[in-house]
Structure formats: C-alpha cells, structure tokens
Image (cartoon, rainbow, N blue to C red):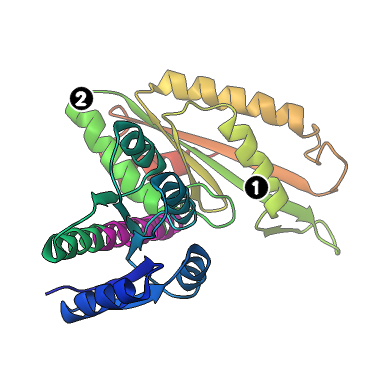
Amino acid sequence: MGEGKILIVDDDGNTRAAYKDLFIGCGFEAAVAENENQALELLRSESFQAVLLDLRVSNNVLLPIAERMKKEFPKVFISMMLIDSTPALMKRAIKAGIDDYQVKPILPMRLIDVIQKGILRYTLEEENFQLKKMVAELQERQKWIMHDLETGVFNSQYFSERLDMEVKRAKRHEHWLSLLLCDMDRSSQGIEGNEETSASPPSSEILELLKILSGNVRNVDIISRYNTGFAIILPETTMEGSFILCNRLKRTLADTFEASGSRSDGGSNRRLNVRFGVATYPVDSHLPRKLIKIAEDRLQ
C-alpha cells in the first residue's frame, strides 16, 4: 500500500512500537527515535522522506522542535501530532513551513493517508529538483558546445547557423543585415633576411581585440569566433552603418596599438595586423555563404 521511509519520533515506547508496526504493515520502511536528539542523529545519517512527531509535551515545546527539524531538513515532510489547535499555533506552524499537523486522536488509516501523500509530495519535489539540476547541466554543456573555449564568445559553427537564421529573419521582415569580419594575425620578421612568418595571435591579443569589439557593438549584435579573428553579425544595419562601425574600431585599435603595429605596452616587437571586411544583405547577396565570401574578399 505505502512506500517510502518514515522516522517516528515518540517518547512513549508502546506508542512507538505501535506506530512502527502500523507503518511497516502498510509497506513503509520505519525507524524510531524517542527524543529530538536521537531523531536529528538519524536524520543526519539516513535518508527519510517523512517524520511523524508525537511527543508528550505541550504544543509550545513541540513546535520549536519541529521548526528546528524543518530548518535543517527543509525537504522532509513533517507531520506533528498536537494536543489541541489554536489559530495562533496554526499561523506559526505555517510560517515555519511545517507540512502537516493533526489533533489527537486520529484514525490510523487517516494517519497513513497523510504520510503517504506527504512522501509522494517529497518524491515529486525531489524528482523536480533533480530534473532542474539535469536541465541546468545540459544547458551548461550546450553553452560550451556553442562557445569558443578560449574567448567565451560563440564558435564558428554557431556563427554559420546564426547567420543563416538572421538572413532569413532579415528577408522575412525586409530589414538590412550586415556582416563584419575581423581577421587577425601576427607577422614577424624572420631571423634570416626579410622573410615574414605568420602564426596565430596569442591569447592576450585575441582577448584584447575582443574587448575592443565588445565595447563598440550593440547588445543585439552577435560576436563569434571566425578563423584567427572574429565575425560580427549586425542585425538591421546598413552598409553605411557597418562602415561607420568599422572606422570606429580602426580608430580604437589605433589608440590601443602604436602606429608601428607594436603593442602599446611595449610587450612585443612583432607587428599586429587587423583587417576588416564587410558585406551587407540584400545589396551584396541574399545567401549567407556568399556574404561570408564577399566579406572575406574585402578584408583589408
């Protein structure tokens, strides 16, 4: 009939035994304690879904015991057996979060029904908590599936999918849409002769460039990692608007890096190259891949 584990807290040995036999006979697991300290020790060492609290003390003494249990074990269903009930006591019990209280005497099957419903509620709340935890973990995993681990912005795979979605949205609402590519590499003078070698930019410079980009775009603009740099999707932005942004970024970069191309902090003697390319829907193309190709061809 029943299922779940209940802790019976009663200071009368015969009553404890009777309660235990009753619940075990109805299919529950049951443990007993004769006072608050024993009950807390059991609650801390074992897993219970419900507590039946029936001590031969006044209600003013019993309620604080229930409050302490509820504070330490908020998920456990607690039912108190009271000598009598008053509006003030009921109000205090509700405020303390006590799940249930019954005025003695109570029919055994009524008590079984109360505990069974309490355990069911506990089980549903625990399952709901675990589901929420699982969803949060999946969302966190999904976040990193879509994001670049080095910079935290969207990765190139997400960029391709999002650009396709934004082009469709621009077409549906007859809006402009611009794409700004920001390509970054570092060229250094070779040891022998004047031959230049290229390599991916170090993380510090990638992050500094990202900081500049993030500080100059709107909240609705989407920054993603693309090749050695970044791509910025600019919803509802004309070609003129994208050129204005591009020029602003160049000025900010000029303030950050010296005219020679070295870092303004003097930390490197290698030249930093940042190139920008712009393409706009619908004037350049209606196709996402074509917009990317045009923006790449315009990198300078």
Residue 90 in which image quadrant: top left
Measured in 3D between alpha carbons, the distance from the residue under mark 1 to the one under mark 2, in whole angstroms, is 35 Å
Residue range highlighted in magenta = 122-144
Q: Main secondary structure of the magenta part?
A: helix
Q: Position of residue 246 (x, y in %)?
A: 55, 27
Q: Which residue is mark 1?
A: 206
Q: Which residue is mark 2?
A: 173
Type of amino acid at the residue the image marks with label 1: Ile
Type of amino acid at the residue the image marks with label 2: His
- The residue sitting at 57% across, 52% down in the picture is 228
- Circle 1 SS class: helix
Depth check: give the residue in front, 67 or 11.
Answer: 11
Q: Position of residue 34 (x, y in %)?
A: 44, 70
Depth check: give the residue in front, 97 or 177.
Answer: 97
The disc placed on residue 167 is: none
- The residue sitting at 86% across, 46% down in the picture is 267
Badge 2 density bin: few <14, some 14–19, many ≥20, Cα 10 Å: few
